[in-house]
Amino acid sequence: LAVEDLRRDLQKVFGAPSPIVEDPAALRGRSAIVVLGATGGPAGLHHAGITGREAHGFHVRDFGGTAHVVLEGADPRGTIYALYSFADEILGVPPLWFWSGWNPARRELIDVPSGTERIFPPAYVRWRAWFNNDTDFLTPWRERSPAHDHAVYETVLRLKYNTYEIGSVADLRAGAPRFAANRDAAGAHARGLVITHHHTSPLGSSLGNWAAFWRREGREPPPLSVREPANLATFWRYHAETAQRAGFEQVWTIVFRGAGDIPFWQTFKDAPADTAARAQVI
């Protein structure tokens, strides 16, 4: 998906398509943009400085008597960042191009000097998350077109975030298969992003889905009760298993809140009234 974004950027800038070549022999001595992961590819194309979590960069390498522009990552997400870094710094495509009314300056030629070495080490902050608030405004727009979803995920990655924050990880709509994942979480995962949640979403669940969950389990929804932790555990376990079955790379959020931006004692009718007892529940 990131390669297709780069091909779109190249076409916007140069006005011509860029074919994908799988076999280096097919180049017949012509220069190419080489997308290189941590494994595979000729050893002579790798840059020794691209090591560590999400490290990436682009550089020029001579191989077989021909110079190539190499976009390289130390791991899959690093490789994605390398593609977008090249688009930003060499093609002039800004990370927020979609939202800014940006149009490319058409170019006939871009010279990449033979000594080019733009290397990005691992980020100082391991988890870098973007929560697209306010979702009540954003969601209807995103539902108009898959291209809108694509633009959101692409922008997250172009800005070199790696963690995408959602509410519930589970799709509990009527007719959805058991352990079906939320579409937004699945879409972010498909782009190579880590999934995490926010302060109202313990283990990727939302109390707004409490009744829907139990009816899918064939039961009348039990009341929300701090005296029945087994019901909460069943609810949370389902969401954790949903993420596990989907293969999500996950940063788990452990929290106990009410149904929204309120404390739990406003949602759970049997919650204790004094501060110490409320803390004990948490």
Image (cartoon, helix red, strand yellow):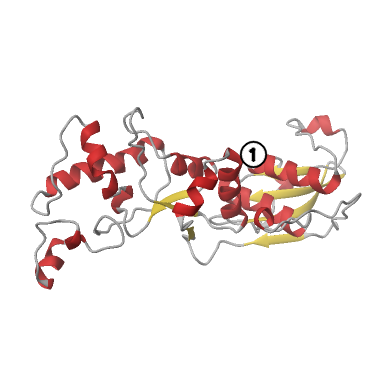
Q: Is residue 223 above or below residue 275?
A: above
Give the side of residue 273 with respect to residue 198, left or right: left
Residue at 80%, 46% in the rendered image:
12
Dot 1 corresponds to which residue?
Answer: 40
Give the side of residue 203 with respect to residue 3, left or right: left
Residue 221: name its quadrant.
Answer: top left
Q: Callout 1: 10 Å neighbours few (<14), some, many (20+)?
A: few
Residue nearer the viewer, 151 or 266 = 266
Residue at 87%, 39% in the rendered image:
30
Return the x and y of residue 105 as percentages of the image width and height: 84, 55
Residue 261: name its quadrant.
Answer: bottom left
Outermost residue, bottom side = 275
Return the x and y of residue 120 as percentages of the image width and height: 64, 61
Quadrant for the C terminus in the image? bottom left
The kind of residue tagged 1 is: Gly
Outermost residue, right side = 108
Give the side of residue 50 with respect to residue 273, left or right: right
Counting every numbered tag in the picture gives 1
Callout 1: SS: loop
Residue at 33%, 48% in the rendered image:
204
Residue 194 visible somewhere in the drawing: yes
Residue 164 visible somewhere in the drawing: no
Return the x and y of residue 224 as percentages of the image width and height: 15, 49
